[in-house]
Image (tube, helix red, strand yellow):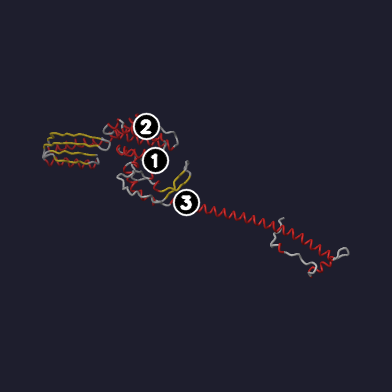
């Protein structure tokens, strides 16, 4: 059971006057006996009070000591709390200072550089940091130009949630500029070899900037060096297109393994069998595209036969050549017709109309004298 708390200071208490105080007179008289007179009773009461008072003083002093210790503990706790609050406030202030924009010093002797530092869009940088596939277009001139134009607007694009963590089970807040793909991006398969050659330099540089393994960077740099010097570049008109297709095919397979966390192959080891297969595919497509040429010759034969039958035209010469590349088929024809100029004009007019309607192309007709025409058809 807890000792009752002493609520007042007992050190100022005085011993009661048992001998003369009327309040104690009846009590003292009632205690007088044959063996104990009044003086004995008073002395006993005084001794008893003195003993009790001494214990009370002792308890009071002990209580004061406990109070002092408790006050000391509370003071220390308040000091610790105040110190903690101050540290947190200073820490928060320091964090705010870090976030606060601090203008860099001005170089009084420097002017704007002639060539600005190329950099891809934040979307591409984020993909590279996460080892995810991103089109090579972002590292070319068009992608860097879009990044330059949009660079000042990045701070106002807002934020969005994106998957984070190794297992992608955590939602993290990311700037929208790192999540938004450019609508202008071109698939690797549709790039020109020139575009590829320009983009690969910044692509390799970005690998180093975001901290890719050195063996990856060396392999990719070696791969593009091999591609630049590959003998297919000397094969016209489709050689460079084959290499572009190979690069696109290989990059997607490599990133697919990387995303699956499986061992990746060495990109610098060119698979010549795959190169040959892609060449066959491209040549097959070119042969299909050349069917337009066959349709042209059929139309030309029918048209000329019709003109010869209806107008008795003497066809003295017809010289034509066909040039094909990976983008279009170009047919150059020179026809000399020994007939009236109006009939020759009618023939080329009909040819232009037919190709515009059926083949999606058009004639560029140039006069070569009153009795001849030369034309170029492009598809």
Task: Estimate how packed mark 3 is, as few (under 14), some (14 to 19) or many (20 or more) residues with alpha carbons within 10 Å.
Answer: few
**Disc 3, SS:** helix
* Sequence-first disc among 1 and 2: 1
Instruction: Name the quadrant of the N terminus.
Output: bottom right
**Disc 2, SS:** loop
What residue is disc 1 on? 209
Task: Estimate how packed mark 1 is, as few (under 14), some (14 to 19) or many (20 or more) residues with alpha carbons within 10 Å.
Answer: few
Quadrant of the rendered image containing residue 55: bottom right
x, y percentage for residue 23? Answer: 78, 69
**Disc 1, SS:** helix
x, y percentage for residue 49? Answer: 77, 62
Q: Judge from the rendering whether residue 345 lies leftward or rightward of residue 154; answer left or right.
A: left
Of the pair 78 and 173, the residue shown nearer to us: 78
Q: Judge from the rendering whether residue 187 lies leftward or rightward of residue 93; answer left or right.
A: left
Quadrant of the rendered image containing residue 282: top left
- How many numbered marks are there? 3
What residue is disc 3 on? 94
Of the pair 279 and 172, the residue shown nearer to us: 172
The residues tagged by marks 1 and 2 sit, at their Cα atoms, a distance apart of: 21 Å
The residues tagged by marks 2 and 3 sit, at their Cα atoms, a distance apart of: 48 Å
Q: Give the number of the disc on residue 248.
A: none
Direction right: furthest residue: 34
Task: Estimate how packed mark 2 is, as few (under 14), some (14 to 19) or many (20 or more) residues with alpha carbons within 10 Å.
Answer: some
Of the pair 307 and 202, the residue shown nearer to us: 202
The residues tagged by marks 3 and 1 sit, at their Cα atoms, a distance apart of: 28 Å
Q: Give the number of the disc on residue 268.
A: 2
x, y percentage for residue 148? Answer: 33, 47
* Sequence-first disc among 2 and 3: 3
Q: Residue at x 71, y 64 (%)?
A: 12
* Sequence-first disc among 3 and 1: 3
């Amino acid at each position: 059971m807890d000792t009752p708390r002493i609520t007042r200071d007992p050190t100022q208490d005085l011993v009661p006057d048992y001998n003369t105080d009327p309040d104690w007179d009846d009590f003292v008289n009632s205690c007088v006996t044959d063996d104990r007179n009044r003086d004995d009773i008073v002395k006993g009461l005084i001794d008893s009070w003195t003993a009790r008072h001494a214990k009370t003083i002792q308890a009071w002093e002990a209580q004061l000591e406990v109070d002092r210790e408790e006050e000391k503990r509370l003071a220390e706790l308040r000091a610790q709390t105040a110190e903690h609050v101050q540290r947190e406030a200073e820490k928060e202030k320091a964090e705010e200072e870090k976030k606060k924009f601090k203008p860099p010093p001005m170089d009084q002797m420097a002017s704007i550089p002639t060539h600005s530092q190329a950099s891809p869009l934040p979307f591409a940088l984020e993909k590279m940091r996460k080892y995810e596939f991103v089109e090579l277009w972002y590292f070319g001139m068009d992608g860097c130009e879009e990044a330059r134009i949009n660079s000042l607007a990045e701070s106002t694009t807002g934020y969005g949630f994106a998957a984070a963590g190794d297992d992608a089970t955590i939602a993290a807040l990311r700037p929208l500029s790192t999540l938004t793909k450019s609508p202008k991006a071109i698939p690797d398969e549709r790039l020109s070899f020139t575009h590829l050659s320009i983009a690969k330099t910044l692509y390799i540089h970005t690998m180093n900037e975001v901290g890719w393994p050195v063996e990856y960077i060396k392999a990719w740099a070696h791969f593009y060096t091999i591609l630049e010097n590959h003998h297919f570049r000397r094969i016209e008109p489709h050689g460079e297109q084959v290499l572009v297709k190979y690069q696109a095919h290989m990059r997607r397979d490599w990133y697919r393994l990387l995303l699956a966390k499986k061992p990746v192959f060495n990109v610098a080891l060119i698979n010549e069998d795959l190169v040959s297969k892609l060449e066959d595919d491209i040549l097959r497509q070119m042969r299909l595209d050349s069917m337009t040429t066959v349709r042209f010759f059929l139309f030309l034969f029918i048209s000329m036969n019709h003109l010869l039958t209806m107008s008795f035209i003497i066809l003295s010469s017809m010289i034509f050549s066909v040039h094909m590349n990976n983008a279009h088929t170009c047919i150059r024809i020179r026809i000399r017709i020994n007939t009236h100029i109006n009939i020759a004009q009618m023939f080329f007019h009909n040819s232009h109309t037919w190709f515009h309607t059926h083949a999606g192309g058009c004639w560029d007709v140039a006069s070569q004298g009153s009795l001849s025409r030369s034309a170029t058809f492009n598809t």
